[in-house]
Image (cartoon, rainbow, N blue to C red):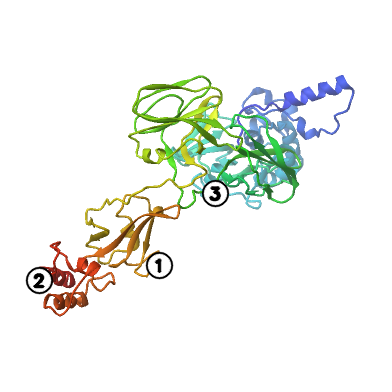
Amino acid sequence: MKISKLFSLKRAISFMLLLSVICSFTLSAIPASALHEEWVMVVQNDSKWTGAANTYGTGTLRATGCGIFSLVNAVGFLTGNAMNVNEVAAWAYSIGAYNKGGADGTYRYELYPYVEAKYGERYGFTMNCNGTQGWWASVKSSVLINHLNSGGVAVAHVPGHFIAIVDYNASTKKYHVLDSYPTNARQSYPGDVWLTESHLTTVSAMTVDWFCLLSEAQTNKVKAPTISSESVVAHNANLSVSWGAVTNATSYNYKAEVFMGETSATTGTVIASGTTTSTSFTVPAQASGKYIKVTVTAVGPENTAAASKTVMLGPWIGSYPTNVEYIPVADINGSVTASSSSLWTAAKGTSFGMTWWRAFLCSPNADGTYTVNTIYENGVEKSVPVSGNQVLWVIHSGYQNYSYAAKIVNGDKLTFVGAYLDNATIRGNGYVLVNGGVPIGPDSLTIKDSTLSYKDTYIKGTLAGTTKENLVAKFNESAEFIVVKDMNGNQVSTGVVATGYTVNLVVNSEVRASYTVVVDGDVSCDGIVSTADMLAVRRVISGSGIFEGVYKLAADTDGSDNVSTTDFAIIRKMVSGS
């Protein structure tokens, strides 16, 4: 992470040293490397960098130290740690990397490739000098740009001078430059500046032709794990919890707690806990409760980091089961009403004024359900009070799911999925299920496609080549309630439907409606209209045969209740495609 603000480390160390005096114990375990100064940008052209104390060879830091200052500024910006300028300069001079000719400044090949070994661990950085040569390239180099975008910094060379480049803005193509010795020629005042790509490639005194890369060193610290599990788990079902391995983690502490109350509850019962070097554990099944809180803590050599996830306890795991009807709750927000929707009212002494609503006054159960105690019918103006921990669920008579709610009776148990009572206020949209999801589905099969029509116990239309899926889509009811069977009574899952098939409305294994399918022109009952169908109709017209029942309905394409030459002509057109 790039850091441009002062760290609080020095204050923390000072406090610890004070404690050592007060409590008379030694802090010798604190490494000297932890005691370095907090970084602020160092400016080379300050007169304080003159004089004998700042002279190496025959050159002063003010006159020849740009390579040293640029390194110190790059490291400081990257890590927040201030290197000692004179210490670095003395070391560089001792290895022949600075002013070895008297006052000739920094020798890049002799200095930068060796800085990491000397100071990297102490100040928290790594150095990449492309071997020992660095990169002879401009600021347009993808190596430099990608490195800056990844959080790194660089020491760069311009004619006769070194600078630090510490950031890049891709949208403006500007580079954040720290120039320890800004000049008019480089147009780099006041030293901490953002300069354009054009500036760093066309201004002669500021054209970058070489760079070396610095990155913040990786530590042994761990990050919080990312927990994976179902968001809802059934009562009496185990819950599998896993997480991705965390870098530097040596082990993981885990804990699962079950809460009987709503999500505002603060006290739960621990139902699983332990330490593992694996990345998963199993939460045992629970017979009651509202939700489970799972916590996983990564343990590393330097720190610990924890993450938590809330898993609701409900009647099933994951998606809704087949053939279960549920009522969407469009508006759950206390006592605010909205037509054509349903809502909960807050508890604790509130009331709900109603006319065209059906209301269910419910009491909470330990398993998270609510039992219907009193039902208030719509049509009469009334005020329904709510007390204690009761909730009142109301649904408008004009709401599209009102017919389902009309089937609810006293004693039914309602489950509110995705909605939670928090300090007497209902939070979140969700669904209402009755008795754990027992179907309360439709009683009739209604057509939404005008190409279909009812005729007694038949459904008739121009359906040649229609698949089972397309037939089901022609009705208003959900596909989960519609079962299609062939002439032998076998359930059909795919393929073309034919004359003699049946379409059935099935709710909770109960067949509530059944119709025989009639495909216009398909007297051979194969789902298509062909020459065979045309010839069969011609035989009947000539007196050589007779159609009855479903076959007659299929042949009667004009709806006249008779099979005639008109029907033959219509079927012949079907066959020819004209």
> How dense is the environment of label 3, judged by Cα within 10 Å: few (below 14), some, or many (20 and up)?
few
Query: In the image, residue 273 lies at what x, y percent?
Result: 73, 42
Residue 59 figure quarter: top right
Q: Is residue 186 visible?
A: no
Q: Amino acid at mark 1?
A: Asn
Q: Which of the two labelled residues, at mark 2 and mark 1, occupies the earlier sequence position?
A: 1
How far separated are the C-alphas under marks 2 and 1?
35 Å
Residue 45: assigned label = none
How many residues crowd around disc 1 within 10 Å: few (fewer than 14), some, or many (20 or more)? few
**Residue tagged by mark 1?**
490
What residue sits right under mark 2 in the picture? 565
Could you say whether the residue bearing mark 1 is in a helix, strand or loop? loop
- Residue at image location 51% in from the left, 24% down from the top: 347
Element assignment for label 2: helix
* 373 sits to left or right of 71: left
3D distance between C-alphas at marks 2 and 3: 83 Å
The kind of residue tagged 3 is Val
Q: Amino acid at mark 2?
A: Thr
Q: Is residue 128 left or right of residue 21?
A: left
Quadrant of the drawing holding the N terminus:
top right
Q: Quadrant of the C terminus?
A: bottom left
Residue at the spot x=69%, y=28% of the render? 38
Q: Which mark is residue 143?
A: 3
Q: Secondary structure at mark 3?
A: helix
| Residue under the point 34% across and 69% down | 487
Q: Is residue 567 left or right of residue 250?
A: left
Percent of width and height locating residue 284: 68, 47
